[in-house]
Amino acid sequence: MDSVNFFSGIEGYRIQKTLRTPLVFKGHGLHSGVTTRIELIPAPPNTGIVFTQRVGRQTVDTPAHFSFVTATALATTLGQKEFPGSEVATVEHLMAALYAMGINNLKIEVRGPEIPILDGSALPFIEGILDTGIELQNYTHRVLKILKPIKVYAHGAICELLPRKSLRLTTSIDFPHPEIGAQTFAMDVSPKSFSEMIASARTFGFLADLDRLKARELALGASLENVLGFSETSVLNPEGMRFQDECVRHKWLDALGDLALCGSWVEGELVSFRGGHAIHLALLKALATHPHHWETLAPESLRPYPAAASPQVKALRIRR
């Protein structure tokens, strides 16, 4: 297998990876409005993605796993319930970028209550990863193989996992707005496809909802610099939309970020209609009640040690 296919093909996702050097992002939180800083630090094989917060004099580590989700209101929040103040909100954009790029092992030091929203998309994370480079590691990644369908319903939303050899996501939305309406987007996951077709899609919202959200202490950091905004009839951003179907592409991004919290590479298809963070969490929890509908492949040691992937990663072209 040549090095490019080794990274970007299906088999490439079965190889554990980390960053070559630490990577820092600074900004403010979409919902908290608070200035935050995160540092992505390379970690050894089989570490997983771990968020680290200082709580008083104590350091609290929270694995990026759905069993540690504490809230799903307009964002996915992770934390340790026995350690108030350990919560890290709005992890989905970062998790989607890491998952799409095949990065499995990182320690993420967080200073603040939330991952910075940056421009509202995953593109800044992808650009940082490409500049820093990716290191292949000498273990295979844990694989979750879907054998039979698993489906959940909630408040008119449907979300399911279906058997498939490669990972594919199909998301559908339906908003009664003249610039959105019914949209569907389906795509197999690869570093190149995510970088070019998904990463730059921004979170979106409606002006009519802003006061209500702020009353709930949500969207306190929202602006047209980090949100694709809509009035009752049109797009508020002077530059317009990055894609005609930017909204459904961002929902695809969110779905991937939530799916990443399963802690495994998935062989299957996620299908989501009117989905959101809450139903994505319900679907992952449904794995426990459908034990014969999936199987896992445990990590195995590899020899010889694979070469670093950064030249191939930097060669990917990103469409802004």
Image: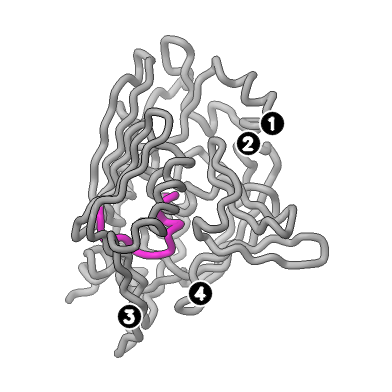
The residue wearing badge 3 is 307
- Mark 1, other Cα within 10 Å: few <14 / some 14–19 / many ≥20: few
Q: Is residue 165 left or right of residue 308?
A: left
Q: Which dot, 1 or 2, sits closer to the camera?
A: 1
Q: CA distance from mark 3 to mark 1?
A: 47 Å
Task: State the CA–CA distance, disc 3 to disc 4.
Answer: 20 Å
Given residues 299 and 312, the one toward you in this image is 299
Q: Nearer the viewer, mark 3 or mark 1?
A: 1
Residue 217's label in the rendered image is 1
Q: Residues within 10 Å of mark 2 (few under 14, many from 20)?
A: many
Question: What residue type is disc 1 on?
Answer: Glu
Residue 312 lies in the magenta-colored region: no
Q: Are marks 1 and 2 in contact (CB under 8 Å)?
A: yes
Dot in front, 3 or 4: 4
Q: CA distance from mark 3 to mark 2?
A: 40 Å
Give the extent of the magenta segment.
257-268
Q: Is residue 245 left or right of residue 238?
A: left
Return the residue at label 4: 47
